Image (cartoon, helix red, strand yellow):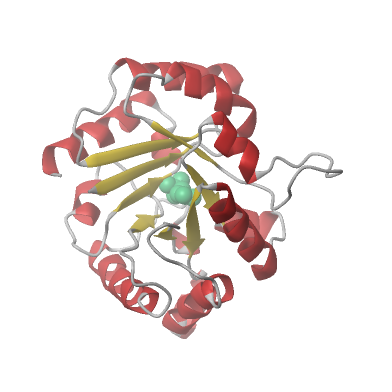
Amino acid sequence: MKYLFDNWKSYLDYKETLALATTLALTPPQNDRLTVAIFPFTPAVSEVIKISEGTPLHLGAQDIEAVSKGAYTGAVSAQVFQELGCTYALVGHSERRQLFSETPEIVRDKFLAALDSGIIPVLCIGETKEIREIGTQVTYLKDQLKETLAGVVLDESKPFIVAYEPVWAIGTGEACDDQEAAAMQAIIKQELTLYTAAEVPVLYGGSVSEKNVVSYVSHDTIDGVLVGKASTEAISMMGIIRLLEQIV
Ligand code: PGA
């Protein structure tokens, strides 16, 4: 199984979001060895779920809050996304960590909230340019996994996914070389065996496009891709799907 996760971030307005979802729902992925999920912004989730009904598309939340019912103004819990029909939630995306000051503790709480609500968290990790230049990225990634996973009981009944997204490659057009990404992901997969006996899919994210997507998913250690910008235009989004359908 390979995965294509489309993170539409805040690139589209409401109407554009529904239009793109409709385009996708009209010619949905046909290959059951490819799991495709879209992550629209929160206000569009329920409508996009309606649009994709009857197709093999999955839905995901771009962000969740680690709260239950109560006085938490503005928060949308993992439980609500589950109720709406989301399968996945991104947790710890670097934009959340950097722009919205999400600490490792917050990321861990969100990860646990997703698991508790029956949502599959997609834990995003990745080193910055500075860390890569110093050469301590492997330790950094291992620490990011530890901050979230240490002490959590993880078995097959609580599946999760990891997305390796080097921060320097996100939204920059400077994608990580596929050999380098595959090697980093081999290390991540090995490290994950410390926390769970279950098979954890590891995706690559960071400037994935029609030009390079095949090179990533051709590696055994790359179970799929998390695509931002290139998934927000119908032509490139559909192009990526069709390319992946041919090779999975
Ligand atoms: P990008 O974003 O494809 O625009 O680099 C990837 C991501 O942030 O998941």
Q: Position of 205 compared to 210: left or right?
A: right
Q: Residue 192's x, y, as percent?
A: 38, 74
Q: Residue shown at 40%/51% (left/top)?
A: 173
- Tag count: 0
Q: Position of 174 compared to 216: left or right?
A: right
Q: Residue 185's x, y, as percent?
A: 32, 69
Q: Quadrant of residue 110?
A: bottom right
Identify the residue at the far left of this view: 246
Q: Residue shown at 61%/46% (left/top)?
A: 63
> Residue 211: in sight, yes or no?
yes
Q: Residue 240's x, y, as percent?
A: 27, 36
Q: Residue 154's x, y, as percent?
A: 46, 67
Q: Position of 80 compared to 182: left or right?
A: right
Residue 46 drawn above or below residue 244 = above
Q: Residue shown at 57%/30% (left/top)?
A: 84
In this view, the residue in front, 77 or 127, is 77
